[in-house]
Amino acid sequence: MEGIQKITEIIRKLLAGKKYPQLREMLACMEGADIAEILSETDNDSLLVIFRLLPKELAAEAFVEMDSDQQQTLITSFTDRELTGLLDELYDDDTADIIEEMPANVVQRILKNASPETRRSVNELLKYPDNSAGSIMTTEYVNLRKHYTVGEAFSFIRSVALDKETVYTCYVTDNRRLLGVVSVKDLLLASEDTAVADIMDTNVIHVHTEDDREEIAVLFSHYDFLAMPVVDREDRLVGIITVDDAIDVLQEEADEDMAIISAVTPTDKPYLKTPTAELWKARIPWLLLLMLSATLTGIIITGFENALSSLVVLTAFIPMLMGTGGNAGSQASVTVIRGISLNEIDFPDLLKVVFKEFKVSILCGITLAAATFAKVLLIDRLLLGNTDISVMVAFVVSLTLCVTVILSKIIGCSMPLLAKKLGFDPAVMASPFITTIVDAVSLLVYFGFASWILHL
Amino acid sequence: MEGIQKITEIIRKLLAGKKYPQLREMLACMEGADIAEILSETDNDSLLVIFRLLPKELAAEAFVEMDSDQQQTLITSFTDRELTGLLDELYDDDTADIIEEMPANVVQRILKNASPETRRSVNELLKYPDNSAGSIMTTEYVNLRKHYTVGEAFSFIRSVALDKETVYTCYVTDNRRLLGVVSVKDLLLASEDTAVADIMDTNVIHVHTEDDREEIAVLFSHYDFLAMPVVDREDRLVGIITVDDAIDVLQEEADEDMAIISAVTPTDKPYLKTPTAELWKARIPWLLLLMLSATLTGIIITGFENALSSLVVLTAFIPMLMGTGGNAGSQASVTVIRGISLNEIDFPDLLKVVFKEFKVSILCGITLAAATFAKVLLIDRLLLGNTDISVMVAFVVSLTLCVTVILSKIIGCSMPLLAKKLGFDPAVMASPFITTIVDAVSLLVYFGFASWILHL
């Protein structure tokens, strides 16, 4: 991070002194991702100057890592020839991703300047729905014929390598049907005249174009693959997903889950670069919704106002009861939400999950109730001298806590699974919502026990 | 997931009928990770029978994916010859990972049966602290000499490929000093007699053995690398980290963050396989701690007991004020925690972050206060007919909400950065802790304004 700042300083000086040859040489030694990071801090004029100094391939690498505003600025400033040159260097899946973020007139210009094959392949990729395997795959993979020898395979790979996102995993097809997979390592270890068909692995793990991209990304971490083949409904190979895209999906999905768990609408910009108004827009609807739903707790308390005014000490335990219930519930809900994300838990496991949480919650409930009973009598009554607290009050508080924790954990673990079943994002059922429900539940339990045991 | 269950059924039947040749053939077509998943459900006797039917390489692949209890069962049942055979197939970094989970007598047996080179390399790897680059790297990389031609490089790669975790990224060294990096793709695209030194990239991005493994994993998603070279303090190449291990680190760190954010001690077992007692142990300390810290809110409420009993309606708004403050605070804290994990935010950004949250919180605070003012008067007073609610009460509630939201967001965003600075895990400062602090703050603000404005 610090390195980047120093380099940005140097680049600024070289730019100011118009020392373009030195600047070009320096940039050529860098990684595309770092150049994109540096460019994100520069103004539009310098952006174009620096970008034009980059070698073609590096320019493409940096371009795909830039944010869409800057991509649009560059595309608008490019001549048609420059644009065609850039598009030649980009992989088709990246071009498709870029197009998705551009306004219609820019899209038209991109497609007009792309080669006919790129245009066809990009149009194909754009058809797949967001979050599907099709939307993150590339059509530029190495496709071997089954009659190739290893020697022929290597000649073929050499002839196409420049345009392929990865050459290390090659797919053997016949009439577009996926027959097998062979790695360059396998090919290197075989003799020149071995038939590819003899060394390929015919049990090819593959996914379908409409499969969910998150589930596929999890498969990468399960199988340690570098690439995953994608087939269409007729089982024909249409593309591959590479491991770098799978990593991005895993990171984005974790980002999204974290955002939703903390009641924020996910955005794809880094925090420090997100404008204040955008942060406000991502947060305020949830705060308003949760605030309004707290009306319920207000109504419950108002309903028990008379009971409360006759024994005001009961009020002092409300935050503790609601807080502990909320924490117990969100422990269960976030654990289940993450399990769902990792494909470890699904709706059919509902009963198993509820039973497990029931057992855990009984243990937790009893422990907490015992601790509270002792704490209320020893600290609140004896140490702090609050004589309004009788043994029966301590008993009501402890009993409420135990029951609240059990109910909270059962609500917490089942809501995300129900959400999944109903087609919602399970993460929506995280802490804030669970807390709101649990708040109401714990108050009802509290006032119920208080009325019954303390005869209020 | 369902496929795995069907296969488990078939395997059980084949085992019961002692149809070992068919079973062997079926297993040979499967992936190691899937075999490990199936084995995780079988008893120890079947485990050993099935494991012994696996081809050597596949057995090793399955072994590294198994949980450490089953690994230990197998190692204990193995003959010395079987153990040596397995260790020959394992990569040294996997052996080191396995050893870390074994009791001393099993470790001794493993080291006794390993080859001298493996023993040396494993002992080397075990020296690195947890969470360091050294702890996740492998020493089995392809090391080219700078005087090699491309043809010589390929012969060398062929001769060592079997024992290397990846052959696709090769490192050029001189006296163990890292000179450059060259990919197999680069080699394939060059002619046989080109010097490797002429096509290698000499600006090698590398990390140090003691670097934090999470920061390195994030670099993989930044640079789209398949491998990252690791150097020691004298800048000598000592190993590489492969992309599959980086993915595992990213997943584990996200798991950990999620667990800590929901006040659960992270465990590395899948939820459904974690025993009840272990779940209880991971959750109860946090619940107890947070419950006890809620004593503070109890004390604050008790201190204002007289004021509350003179205007009991104030009690009805306590849950809404604390809840909204907690939600506002955890929005800020989780956002910052994730930013820290992704290397986007660090301690020096503290002022920038606080200023940003200050602006967002003013917008949120004003919106929420306005909404609350209208809601309290229209719904709670007019619609629900609660005549205790005066305009001044509505004003106090709204003002408290606005100030609470501002304070909550500032506390929420700064605590994780302070934790990082002090060497704690920033995730500890997530919702539950922020909520506990914010609860106390919101009560103090509420009772302060109420005493002052309503003269209680």
Image (cartoon, coloured by chain):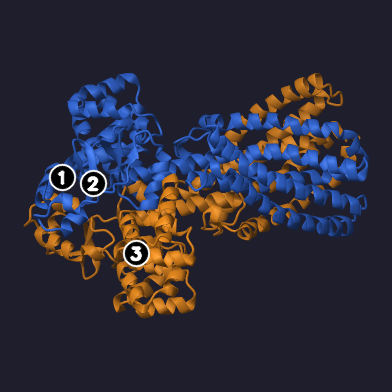
Chain colours: A blue, B orange
Whether pointer 3 and pointer 2 mark residues with C-beta atoms closer than 8 Å, the reply is no
User: Residue under circle 2?
Assistant: A180
Q: Residues within 10 Å of mark 1 (few under 14, many from 20)?
A: some
Whether pointer 1 and pointer 2 mark residues with C-beta atoms closer than 8 Å, the reply is yes
Estimate the x, y position of residue B225 in percent, counting from the top left. 30, 51
Quarter of the image where the C terminus of chain B is located: top right
**Whether residue A90 is situated above or below residue B134 in the rendered picture:** above
Quarter where residue B284 is shown: bottom right
Quarter where residue B275 is shown: bottom right
- Looking at the picture, which amino acid does disc 2 mark? Gly
Farthest front residue in view: B17
Farthest left residue in view: B193
User: Residue under circle 1?
Assistant: A146
The chain containing the residue under callout 1 comes to: A
**Whether residue B431 is situated above or below residue A286 in the rendered picture:** below
Q: How far apart are labels 1 and 2 at the CA level?
A: 9 Å
Estimate the x, y position of residue B343 in percent, counting from the top left. 44, 49
**Whether residue A143 is situated above or below residue B91 in the rendered picture:** above
User: Residue under circle 3?
Assistant: B53
- Looking at the picture, which amino acid does disc 1 mark? Lys
Estimate the x, y position of residue B303 in percent, counting from the top left. 85, 46
Q: Is residue B439 visible?
A: yes
The chain containing the residue under callout 2 comes to: A
Q: Secondary structure at mark 3?
A: helix
Compared across the picture, whether B228 is left or right of B300 comes to left
Q: Secondary structure at mark 1?
A: loop
Q: Which residue is at the front of the view, A30 or A322?
A: A322
